[in-house]
Amino acid sequence: MNSQKLASHVANLLVVDDTPDNLRLLSTMLSDKGYKVRGVINGEMALKAARSTPPDLILLDITMPQMNGYEVCQHLKADGRTSGIPVIFLSALDRVLDKVKAFAVGGVDYITKPFHLEEVLARVENQLTIQRLQKKMHEQNARLQESEAKERNKSQQLELALQQLQNAQAQLIQSEKMSSLGNVVAGVAHEINNPISFIKGNLSPVREYTEDLLRLVQLYTEDFPNPTAAIQEQLEAIDFAFLRNDLPKLIASMSIGADRIGEIVQSLRNFSRLDEAELKVVDIHEGIESTLMILQHRLKDEADQTIIKVVKEYDDLPKIECYAGQMNQVFMNVLTNAIEALQSPKRWANDVDYSRSIPTITICTKLLSDFQVGIYISDNGPGITQDIQQRILEPFFTTKTVGTGKGLGLSISYTIVVDDHGGQLRCFSIPDQGATFAIEIPIYHSTKRFFEENLGGL
Ligand SMILES: Nc1ncnc2c1ncn2[C@@H]1O[C@H](COP(=O)(O)OP(=O)(O)OP(=O)(O)O)[C@@H](O)[C@H]1O
Ligand SMILES: [Mg+2]
């Protein structure tokens, strides 16, 4: 069984020889064996024929006038359309040097004249088989690469889906956490608001009534300078002189306390803007202050002594168009992280320097341009190493013990700052010296849209 019959198509051969007798002999011999054979008598014609219908194999005579076989082969190899066609050289020359040159210019085999039928056929079939196998291998490789690419694509899609799921889950958990906090805060603020209004409302009549009563007692003492023994006894028992002096002070301090509770309630209400979904034009400093107020108990101890100092360096900022409740969540997350970093045992473990520095959070705000403000929250805690910094924005990444951190604060904050407000959230840290979180947001929401549409973000 001949290999040309094995092929899915009959092999197409081009024979190039300037000697008509040779050409005829070869053509007849190969045609008889079932090959499709074209014969040409010089290099020019060979190149033309090869380019118009590329054959499966070329039998190329070396010694030809004008363009010899080596040159023809070089032209064939230099042209992308013909470079893949195997070339078997035909020559009467049988010197080692000629064979070397034949291979050097790109030939795959060499047949010496005079031809022996069996040898020619064996060499032709050999090359055709090699070529077919190569083709098959290329096809298989291409198929393999294609299916590999498909698999890679599939796994990338899966990874993306997983990431989206994780993000969605993170959003859900956080919004549940924050909305329950928001609800509690809003509820407490609402419940306290009524009684505190009673107290504040009643304090000024109480002050007036007491002043009236004290004036009345004064009048009595003036009109009756010699009280009875019972009255005298009572005056001493209640230490009237002290009481008269102290009562107005007491009422004044109650009034200050009531005002303070009023401010706290206002702050709580401010913070619980959490549930407000619309864009609002707000004072960012108010948001930071109300968040600090909520975190107050973590900054001071039971005796009201400062555990963590808060330094504020506020710039003169315009009002910002943003989702106020969400921005408060960001301040809450970043400030909570700073507090937790300052309280971590690591902070006290490494360096003697710490014993000299007071745990401090610095909040700095800055008008960056007509369109942008920056809020920088720094702490002098243990800082964040480079490899951890790369992961802090991943949902569920935490270095805190189970139950302490969920690893959500920063990933949620990133979504709020970057996706919802078109801003930037970045972290800078020198390990052992502290960390700074930079939140930079546009002043107008329309700026966010402008940058998104024209420049692909701020
Ligand atoms: N100021 C900081 N100093 C040192 N490390 C920090 C600081 N802020 C964040 N990190 C690191 O980043 C990690 C991720 O913070 P993130 O707020 O996302 O999650 P978490 O605080 O661990 O948990 P959660 O906020 O859900 O309670 C933290 O576990 C911590 O390792
Ligand atoms: Mg956190």
Image (cartoon, rainbow, N blue to C red):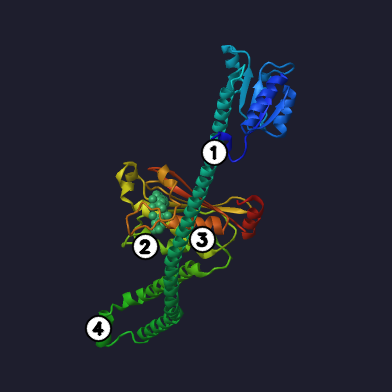
Q: Residue at x 66, y 22 (%)?
A: 60
- Could you tell me which secondary element the residue under label 1 belongs to? helix
| Residue 188 image position (x, y, % from top left) | 41, 74
Amino acid bearing label 2: His
Q: Tag on residue 233?
A: 4
User: Does any atom of ligand 1 lie closer than 8 Å to the CB of label 4?
Assistant: no
Q: Does residue 262 appear left or right of residue 302 in this picture?
A: right
Of the numbered discs 1 and 4, the one sitting upstream in the chain is: 1
Residue under pointer 3: 327
Q: Does residue 393 appear left or right of residue 72 in this picture?
A: left
Q: Residues within 10 Å of mark 3 (few under 14, many from 20)?
A: many
Q: Residues within 10 Å of mark 1 (few under 14, many from 20)?
A: few
**Distance between mark 3 and mark 1 Cα atoms:** 62 Å
Q: Residue furthest front?
A: 32
Q: Are marks 2 and 3 in contact (CB under 8 Å)?
A: no
Q: Residue at x 71, y 17 (%)?
A: 64
- When asked about the image quadrant of residue 92, the answer is top right
Q: Nearer the viewer, mark 1 or mark 4?
A: 1
Q: Tag on residue 297?
A: 2
